[in-house]
C-alpha cells in the first residue's frame, strides 16, 4: 500500500493506523521536499502496489504529485478527508471522511474489485 502526501500529522496518523491494522505501508514523499524517486527508486517501479491512499492536512490541499503518479500507473486511489468539491475526487476510486474502520472496509472493497 502506498501512502501519499507531505509528511505531517494526518499522514503520520494514516501510516500508523494502516501499519497497526496489519498493512505493509510504503511512502513516496521523502519527508522534506520531493518524491523518493528523485534520489532513489520510486515505489511504483520497485514493488507491486495494489492501492494508494492519500490524506491532506486539515485546511490544506492534496499533494498532486504522488496522486498523479499513482493515477498514471493505474493504481486505485482512496482519499481521506476530501471535501465534496475537491478536484482530487475525479481521480479517486473511493473516498472516506477520516481514518477509521470505514477506511479499512473501503480498502478491502477496492482490493477485491475487478
Image (cartoon, rainbow, N blue to C red):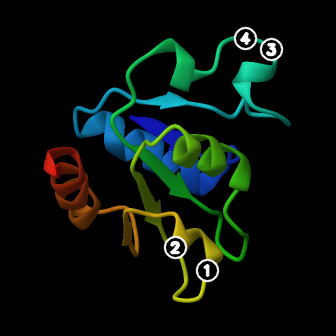
**Residue under pointer 1:** 86
Give the Cα separation between the discs numbered 2 and 4.
29 Å
Q: Nearer the viewer, mark 3 or mark 2?
A: 2
**Residue under pointer 3:** 39
Q: Which mark is residue 2?
A: none
Which numbered disc flags the more N-terminal residue, 2 or 4? 4
Give the Cα separation between the discs numbered 1 and 2.
6 Å
Up-down: is 91 above or below 53?
below
Q: Residue at x 67, y 50 (%)?
A: 8
Left/right of residue 5 with respect to residue 27 in the rendered view: right
Give the Cα separation between the discs numbered 3 and 2.
29 Å
Identity of the residue furthest to the right in this view:
33
**Residue under pointer 2:** 89
Tell me if mark 4 has few (under 14), some (14-19) or many (20+) residues whose alpha carbon lies within 10 angstroms of its own. Answer: few
Q: Do the CB atoms of the residues marked 3 and 4 lie less than 8 Å apart? A: yes
Which numbered disc flags the more N-terminal residue, 1 or 3? 3
**Residue under pointer 4:** 40
Task: Classify mark 2: helix, strand or loop.
Answer: helix
Give the Cα separation between the discs numbered 1 and 3.
30 Å
- Quadrant position of residue 42: top right
Give the Cα separation between the discs numbered 4 and 1.
31 Å
Q: Do the CB atoms of the residues marked 4 and 1 lie less than 8 Å apart? A: no
Amino acid at each position: 500500500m502506498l501512502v501519499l502526501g507531505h509528511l505531517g500529522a494526518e499522514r503520520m496518523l494514516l501510516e500508523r493506523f494502516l501499519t497497526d491494522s496489519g498493512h505493509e505501508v510504503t511512502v513516496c514523499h521523502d519527508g522534506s521536499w520531493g518524491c523518493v524517486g528523485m534520489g532513489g527508486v520510486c515505489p511504483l517501479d520497485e514493488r507491486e502496489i495494489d492501492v494508494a491512499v492519500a490524506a491532506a492536512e486539515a485546511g490544506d490541499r492534496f499533494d498532486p504529485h504522488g496522486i498523479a503518479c499513482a493515477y498514471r500507473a493505474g493504481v486505485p486511489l482512496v482519499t481521506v478527508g476530501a471535501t465534496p468539491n475537491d478536484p482530487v475526487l475525479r481521480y479517486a476510486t473511493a473516498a472516506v471522511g477520516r481514518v477509521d474502520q470505514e477506511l479499512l472496509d473501503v480498502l478491502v472493497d477496492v482490493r477485491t474489485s475487478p
